[in-house]
Each structure stands twice: as C-alpha cells, then as structure tokens.
Amino acid sequence: MNLANKITLLRILMVPLIIVLLYFEGPVFCFLAACAFGFASLTDWVDGYIARRQNMVTSMGKFLDPLADKVLVCSVLIMFVHLHWVPAWVVIVMVCRELIVTGLRAIAMDEGIVLAADKFGKAKTVLQICAIIPLTLHYPYWGYELWRLGEWLLYLAMLMAIFSCINYCVGFYGKQRKQTSAAAEELHTDDPRA
C-alpha cells in the first residue's frame, strides 16, 4: 500500500462525501460537492504521476485506479438521475459502456491481450469531468447557469463513450483474431505431417 495507492483509495472514500453533499442540494452544498469532485478528479492525475515518477506502479494500483475513476464518475451520474438533473438514458449508456469495457479488458487480460486506453476513452474521461463539475453547480452562480454547459459536455462525453466502446470491441476482436491465427500457424508448423 504505497502513497499512490493511498491517494487512489482517498478518491474512492470521497465518493460518499460528494453524494451526501448532493443529497442536501442547495447552492452551498452543490458548490462544496463540485469542489470535492474537482479535488477527487485531481487525485487521479496525482496518483498516476507519483506512481510513474517514484516507480510505484503495482498490480493493485493498476486495478484500483480505473476502479476508483468508475466508482467516482458513475456514482455522481447516478445521483444526478436521482435528482432529475440528467436523463437516465444518458447515464445508462455511459454506465453500460464502463461495464462492457471493463469486462472486455478482463477477458483480454486472461487471453494475454493488452487493450491500452484509446484516445476516445481519454477524451471521454476529460469530457465527463468537465461536464460533472458544472452539472454539480446546478444553481445559478454569479448570474450564470453553468449546468447548461455541463449538459452539452455530458452529451459529448456520451458520444465519446460510444466511440470508445466500439473502438475497444473492434481492437479486441482484431487482436484476438491475430492471436488465434498465429497460434494456428504455429501449430501447423509444429505438426510433423505438415
């Protein structure tokens, strides 16, 4: 349990705080929830930076980091549905994407296939964070309704989530076919009757 992993755990532990702040609604609580979410999102960059800089990359960290991201984002999005701040279907699409990609990565890992994060997935993550902060600020602040910007960014994030999911599925299928072909070719060349 190194420093990077402790920071990742902190991100998970901040989720209940953010949800409770959103539950009470009101401009002050929403502002505090947005600040807490922003801080939690920042820890995603910090733990990765520390892990790489101080050579603290571990199997636990590789598991915890994406899990913390998904728990943080999905929890807040589901709370938004509860508060009637975003349409349920948008959140369903985004949560299903996370489940599909996570399952696909688990299958790929089991088969020795590496599915690296793609540009659509990275864009989706950035757009989600940029959408959630103004959506959390659900009330007018300084004369601006920032949540309207958050709605548009969330729709863009959903599109990136769909493209990313398709890209992961196509990439997995291609790598799996290549691996199967290579295994069949190796088996064929090892066969003395060939």
Image: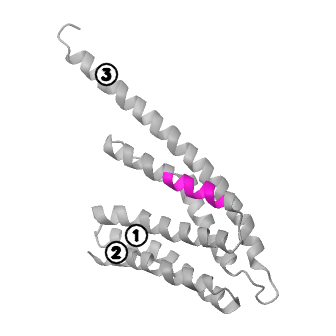
Q: Is residue 27 left or right of residue 182?
A: right
Q: Is residue 82 left or right of residue 20?
A: right
Q: Secondary structure at mark 3?
A: helix
Which circle marks residue 4 in the picture? 2
- The answer to whether one can see residue 116 in this image is no
In the image, the segment drawn in magenta is 90-99
The percent coordinates of residue 101 (x first, y second) are: 48, 50
Q: In the image, what residue type sits under mark 3?
A: Ala
Query: Majority secondary structure of the magenta segment?
Result: helix
Q: Residues within 10 Å of mark 3 (few under 14, many from 20)?
A: few
Which quarter of the figure is the C terminus placed in? top left
* Separation (CA) of disc 3 from disc 1: 39 Å
Which quarter of the figure is the N terminus placed in? bottom left
Q: Earlier in the sequence, mark 3 or mark 2?
A: 2
Marks 1,2: beta carbons within 8 A: yes
User: Which image quadrant for residue 48?
Assistant: bottom left
Residue at 39 percent across and 74 percent down: it is 8
Q: Which residue is mark 3?
A: 184
The image's colouring method is one colour
Q: Which residue is mark 1?
A: 48
Q: Nearer the viewer, residue 36 or 117?
A: 36
Q: In the image, what residue type sits under mark 2?
A: Ala
In magenta stretch: residue 92: yes
Outermost residue toward the right?
Answer: 143
Residue at 77 percent across and 72 percent down: it is 148
Outermost residue toward the top?
Answer: 193
- The answer to whether one can see residue 170 in this image is yes
Q: In the image, what residue type sits under mark 1?
A: Gly
